[in-house]
Image: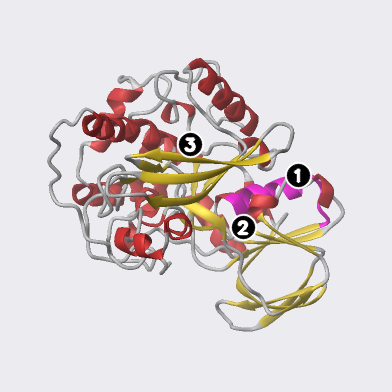
Amino acid sequence: AWRDRYPSLHLHDPVWYNHMPYLPFPETWPVLCPRDKIADWMEFYARALDLNVQTQSRVMAVHKQDERTWEVRVQITDVDRVVRTKTLRAKHVVFATGNSSHPRTPKIPGVFGGVQLHSSQYRGGRTFGDKRVVVVGSNNSGFDIVQDLWEQGAKSVTMIQRSPSLVVSTESVLKHGLGPLYRQDAPLHHEEADLVATATPYKMLIPRWIQVSNQMKETDSKLHQGLLEAGYCLDFGPDGTGLFAKSATEGGGFYINMGCAELLIRGDVDIKFATVSRFQNDTVVIKDNYTKKEENIQADVVIYATGFDTMDQWVSELCGQNVANKVGRTWGLGLGKRPKDPGPWEGELRNMWKPTTVDGLWFHGGNLAQSRHYSRFLALQLAARYIELCTPVYGVPKPTEPSNLV
């Protein structure tokens, strides 16, 4: 999957934060790892650890065969392009699909005469070197694509920011956010740092998040001032909790600057805080979020960096809506400050790495650091059940709402 993304894709977290279990990245690696290095490493990792990985596969359905057994139907495409179906049976099923599912593309009235694609289909800006491009979306993927298009010589690039978002510098993330625990000369091994980072309950982390957010604001004051003057609308999270709260409650809504912010500030790329009203042939009609006035943008290409549906959609699609409703939402804390994270307060990330209301159904996701740390505890819970070790569960939360409500 990594090789199928745009060539300029990089991890936005530092290498010391992203080590994988058992095999840390080499010390010679860059701070921000590029796409192909990660793809190479994952292939090597699977071989080195003798992992049973089935590629070229698509899960078609996941159902309970009986009270203790799940049945998973998988469609496999062989090297000779022959498609066959295989049925797996297990006591436990783990959805380790990341925090997202299908690409989310807005429905816009009118007819557009040019090319439209979602960011998941974007393979680089070389083919758009002489085109007028509009990118809808203003988080990590949107910024990455805008920067790549500009570097590849697109005739014009316009970013449409539909809602407020957060931009922070790599410097402030390293200095105030991750640097105290995850850096080249860190006093702790990254696994020890994981324990320190995750030992504090989320309720107690909120004041700390606000403190870190304020420190990052100070470091990034010049960056933020430039973005505001360019027309970008900033959002510092619920109650000013910043980057880490946005990650925990929304699973996104931010950009860690890799150089694109400067393109907006210099005016090399246009930024519009607006919604897309409609298409008219080669024209994208937008409505300014402040003045409510309409503006026409001539375009040959529209790219939707508008994110993905939640992991919950995989549950409803593969297991059925009844199971999805019983499980409820995944991810989020229940802070109740944003539509993506409604209450009630839960205190831990919803349904992640712990028993759910559906016996034998588990969820695993997050960034590489979270996946590294919490995979151990999920594996221990599964191992305990495999050897029939008594494992008391202290209150499985009730689902917050049907998971088809996003």
Mark 1–mark 3 Cα distance, whole angstroms, equals: 22 Å
Which residue corresponds to the image point at 58% horizontal and 24% vertical from the top-left? 43
Query: In which quarter of the view is residue 307 placed?
Result: bottom right
| Quadrant of the snapshot with the C terminus | bottom left
Q: Nearer the viewer's eye, disc 1 or disc 3?
A: 3
Mark 3–mark 2 Cα distance, whole angstroms, equals: 20 Å
Query: Circle 1 sits in a helix, a strand or a loop, which is it?
Result: helix
Which residue corresponds to the image point at 68% horizontal and 53% vertical from the top-left? 266
Q: Nearer the viewer, residue 26 or 262?
A: 26
Q: Nearer the viewer, residue 178 or 214?
A: 178
Amino acid bearing label 2: Ala
Q: Nearer the viewer, residue 10 or 326?
A: 326
Amino acid bearing label 1: Glu
| Quadrant of the snapshot with the N terminus | top right
Mark 2–mark 1 Cα distance, whole angstroms, equals: 18 Å
Query: Is 306 placed left or right of 94 in the picture?
Result: right
Q: Earlier in the sequence, mark 3 or mark 2?
A: 3
Q: Nearer the viewer's eye, disc 3 or disc 2?
A: 2
Q: Callout 3: few (<14), some (14-19), or many (20+) C-alpha neighbours within 10 Å?
A: some
Amino acid bearing label 3: Asp
Which residue corresponds to the image point at 82% horizontal and 64% vertical from the top-left? 300
Q: Which residue is identified by label 2?
A: 305
Q: Which residue is identified by label 3?
A: 13
Q: Earlier in the sequence, mark 1 or mark 3?
A: 3
Q: Nearer the viewer, residue 361 or 165?
A: 361
Query: Circle 2 sits in a helix, a strand or a loop, which is it?
Result: loop
Using the rendered image of the protein, determine whether residue 30 is visible from the camera's viewpoint: no
Q: Which residue is identified by label 1?
A: 151
Residue at the extreme right: 130
**Does the stretch in magenta take in 230?**
no
Q: Which residues are magenta?
A: 141-155
